[in-house]
Amino acid sequence: MRRRLYYVMPDLASARRTMDDLLLARIEFRHIHFLARRGTPMDGLHEANVLQATDIVHGAQLGTAMGAVLGCGVGALLVWFPPAAGIPQVIAIAVATAAGAVFGAWTSSMAAAAVPNSRLRRFASAIAAGKILLMVDVPQHQVDEIHALLNRVHPEAVDEGVEPNIPAFP
């Protein structure tokens, strides 16, 4: 189980030094993500991808649930008002539910890809001011160790807390 730590870095140089220290602390490169204002040079940093920066995961989850419910309703209508004889009732409901879930996930995630991540809303003003957000995913048993390291070595970094439930994907 991993926990996501949030830190707001004042500038690019500080972010690069922090990245180096995290790598020396044996945090894998793929678990370190930086998010900055559009146009900020991120050379040498592992930039947050679309999954971390947008609400695509939340949108897909919501779309899947809503699509499944609507698909199940369409399947029930097919059972009550069959368009052709011989359609097995259980299969009609299952296929309509699955199709609704897939369609809902696809359409909702496409729309959510244009929306900033709702989990990062509290950092929007700092990012707009030119600061850099560090998101580092660490194993639960290393949270205190990494907190202590970053607070000791990088006093300029503002500790913004721990996300208790990071999504398994991304």
Image: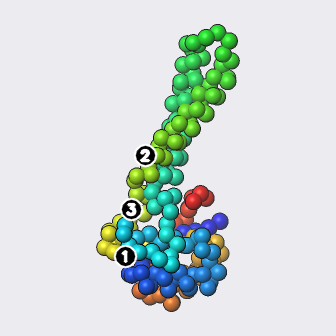
In this view, the residue in front, 21 or 150, is 21
Q: Mark 1 — residue?
A: 131
* Residue 86 position in % (x across, y down): 68, 12
Circle 1: residue type: Lys
Judged left or right of residue 151, residue 27 is: right
Look at the picture and state if 19 lies above or below 128. Answer: below
Say few, some or many: other residues with alpha carbon within 10 Å of mark 3 (under 14 / 14 to 19 / 20 or more): few
Question: Residue 121: which numbered mark, if any?
Answer: 3
Q: Are marks 3 and 2 in contact (CB under 8 Å)?
A: no
Say few, some or many: other residues with alpha carbon within 10 Å of mark 2 (under 14 / 14 to 19 / 20 or more): few
In this view, the residue in front, 11 or 160, is 11
Q: Is residue 64 visible?
A: yes
Q: Nearer the viewer, mark 3 or mark 2?
A: 2
* Residue lying at the far top of the rendered structure: 85
The quarter of the rendered structure image containing the N terminus is: bottom right
Colour option used = rainbow
Look at the picture and state if 77 lies above or below 9. Answer: above
Q: Mark 2 — residue?
A: 111
* Residue 15 position in % (x across, y down): 46, 81
User: Circle 2 — which element?
Assistant: helix
Circle 3: residue type: Arg
Distance (Cα) linking label 2 and label 1: 27 Å
Work out whether mark 3 precedes mark 2 in sequence or the reverse, and give the earlier one.
2
* Residue 142 position in % (x across, y down): 63, 77
Which residue is found at the position 44% from the left and 88% from the top?
155
Q: Is residue 158 visible?
A: no
